[in-house]
Image (spheres, grey):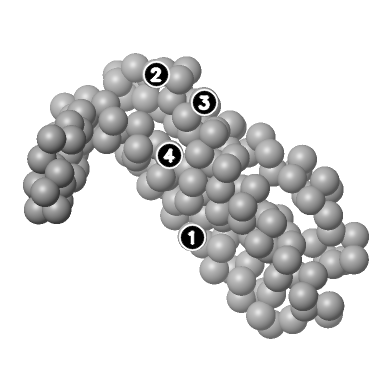
Amino acid sequence: MRSKKIKTVLTIFSVTTILTLLFIWGQSVIPSAGSAKESTSVKNAIEGVLNFVALKELIVSENLVRKLAHIIEYSLLGLQFPVLAVFSEKKIERMAFGKIYPKIALLPMLVAVIDETIQIFSLRGSQVSDIWIDFAGATFAMIISLLICLKIRKSQR
């Protein structure tokens, strides 16, 4: 019988993963002008912080802001997928990095491809480089998250 804690973790991470996916794909629906406006707002906020901490000479471009947004969004997703995979395993003894990682490794790539496809239909265009940036951010976070989850689950035995 599965513990109540594990069911709670699964429920929380299922909901937050769905919300993350909706956020990522929702951002892709925003037309070019709206997306540019958001990027400019974030760029201005970052520049304000940099000016406050006396780093005025650093230049922040809207392109950098967009790429960082991709990395951050997909890193969050990369933290969520392993938690779902590890805590949905019924037999803790059989869990191993080599068993779980292949099950989830390509999920961020699929999400990124869907993301860029949505951008085609919202007339923003699509970039293969964004898919690779998304995948790299998610993969890095997935490996860290998976190692932490396996350590936690192992200590529960």
**Residue type highlighted by circle 3:** Trp
Query: Is residue 88 visible to us here?
Result: no
Residue drawn 90% across and 66% down?
93
What distance separates the C-alpha of mark 3 from that of mark 2?
12 Å
Name the residue tied to disc 1.
16
Mark 3 crowdedness (10 Å alpha carbons): few <14, some 14-19, many ≥20: some
**Mark 1 or mark 3: which comes first in sequence?**
1
**Residue type highlighted by circle 1:** Thr
From the viewer's perspective, tell me whether residue 65 is left or right of residue 9.
left
**Mark 3 or mark 2: which comes first in sequence?**
2
Q: How many labels, in total?
A: 4
Name the residue tied to disc 4.
71
| Marking on residue 126 | 2
Residue drawn 48% across and 33% down?
134
Q: Position of residue 16 (x, y in %)?
A: 49, 60
Q: In front: mark 3 or mark 2?
A: 3
